[in-house]
Image: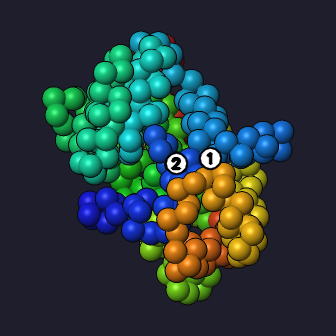
């Protein structure tokens, strides 16, 4: 996908993302991890749930102090900085220069943390002085690969495999399609609201993801289905929000909690809520999966 299209993702030009920003999106822009006991925290906004998803993803990575970790498609850099603070040597890359500028502004002083503009599907040997050879113990990619084309996702798998040391691990967390026909999204999103909002073509079928990972050389250590705590509950929260926002008292209540929403015009509300409803249609056929992929260890070396 072109860099200018990626730069437009999550921008205030789309009222849906402006709504998310007012409700807590900032350092992180993932959709969050929601459990029933934690749902009351929604009154504090979305950031708590976004950090929870990050925590769940990093737990699968099992990175240890001293590990060299590549945070692919790092966005605004929060996860990269968190890895650095945990003792890892963390390298965050993103194809979008604006995102890397934000990451450096926010976390440029974090310990053991560096950022570079680079394409995770075609890593150069050097990017901003950072080596991208086979010296990483871990590679992490949280909720970003869905922006890529199917060919781009295969290239991401190949590059992760290439830059990992033998015995290394790649944790890839992404939206997945639950049928063999990802082109169905065009029927479910006839107005192109979901695809235009996120700047995507289609979601990867899980079976195809797993097949491509194995063809690349990875051992599939685990697949973790996070559809219920991530996409299903995010969509249900969207349903509640839509019902509230369709009434004047409901909008007043939302504006009382998130004052920035007072800037929304009736057209903004209509566009945001129409996009949420389109997500509900697409969501019935999509999932959310964490893939834990290990590069086989060299027999001459101990496994990490």
Q: Residue at x 41, y 31 (%)?
A: 80
Q: Residue 25 carries which label?
A: 2
Total marks placed: 2
Quarter where residue 101 is shown = top left
Q: Can you say which quadrant of the picture contains the N terminus?
A: bottom left
Task: Point out residue 159 in the picture as x, y percentages from the top left corner.
Answer: 34, 44
**Mark 2 burial class by Cα count in 10 Å: few <14, some 14-19, many 20+:** many
Residue 162 visible at all: no
| Depth check, front residue: 15 or 152 | 15
Element carrying mark 1: loop
Is residue 150 positioned above or below 288 on the image? below
Task: Point out residue 207 in the picture as x, y percentages from the top left corner.
Answer: 61, 59
Q: Residue 46 carries which label?
A: 1
Query: Going from the N terminus, do you reach mark 1 or mark 2 first?
Result: 2
| Dot 1 and dot 2 residues touching (CB under 8 Å) | yes
State the CA–CA distance, disc 1 to disc 2: 6 Å
Element carrying mark 2: loop
| Depth check, front residue: 195 or 179 | 195
Q: Which residue is drawn at 46% across and 33% down?
A: 79
Task: Point out residue 224 in the picture as x, y percentages from the top left corner.
Answer: 68, 44
């Amino acid at each position: 996908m072109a860099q200018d299209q990626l730069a437009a993702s999550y921008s205030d030009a789309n009222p849906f993302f402006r709504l998310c920003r007012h409700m807590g999106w900032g350092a992180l822009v993932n959709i969050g991890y929601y459990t029933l006991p934690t749902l009351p925290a929604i009154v504090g906004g979305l950031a708590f749930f976004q950090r929870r998803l990050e925590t769940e993803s990093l737990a699968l990575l099992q990175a240890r102090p001293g590990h060299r970790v590549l945070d692919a498609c790092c966005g605004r850099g929060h996860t990269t900085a968190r890895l650095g603070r945990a003792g890892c040597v963390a390298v965050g890359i993103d194809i979008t220069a604006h995102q890397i500028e934000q990451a450096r502004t926010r976390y440029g002083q974090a310990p053991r943390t560096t950022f570079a503009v680079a394409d995770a599907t075609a890593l150069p040997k050097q990017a901003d002085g950072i080596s991208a050879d086979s010296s990483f113990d871990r590679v992490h990619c949280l909720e970003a690969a869905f922006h890529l084309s199917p060919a781009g996702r295969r290239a991401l798998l190949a590059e992760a495999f290439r830059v990992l040391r033998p015995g290394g691990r790649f944790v890839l967390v992404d939206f997945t399609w639950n049928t063999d026909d990802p082109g169905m999204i065009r029927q479910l999103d006839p107005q192109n609201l979901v695809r235009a909002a996120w700047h995507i073509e289609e979601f990867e079928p899980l079976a195809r993801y797993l097949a491509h990972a194995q063809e690349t050389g990875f051992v599939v250590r685990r697949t973790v289905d996070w559809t219920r705590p991530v996409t299903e509950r995010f969509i249900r929260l969207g349903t509640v929000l839509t019902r509230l926002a369709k009434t004047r008292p409901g909008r007043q209540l939302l504006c009382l909690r998130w004052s920035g929403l007072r800037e929304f015009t009736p057209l903004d509300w209509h566009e945001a809520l129409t996009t949420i409803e389109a997500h509900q249609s697409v969501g019935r056929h999509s999932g959310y999966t964490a893939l834990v992929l290990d590069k086989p260890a060299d027999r001459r070396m101990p496994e990490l």
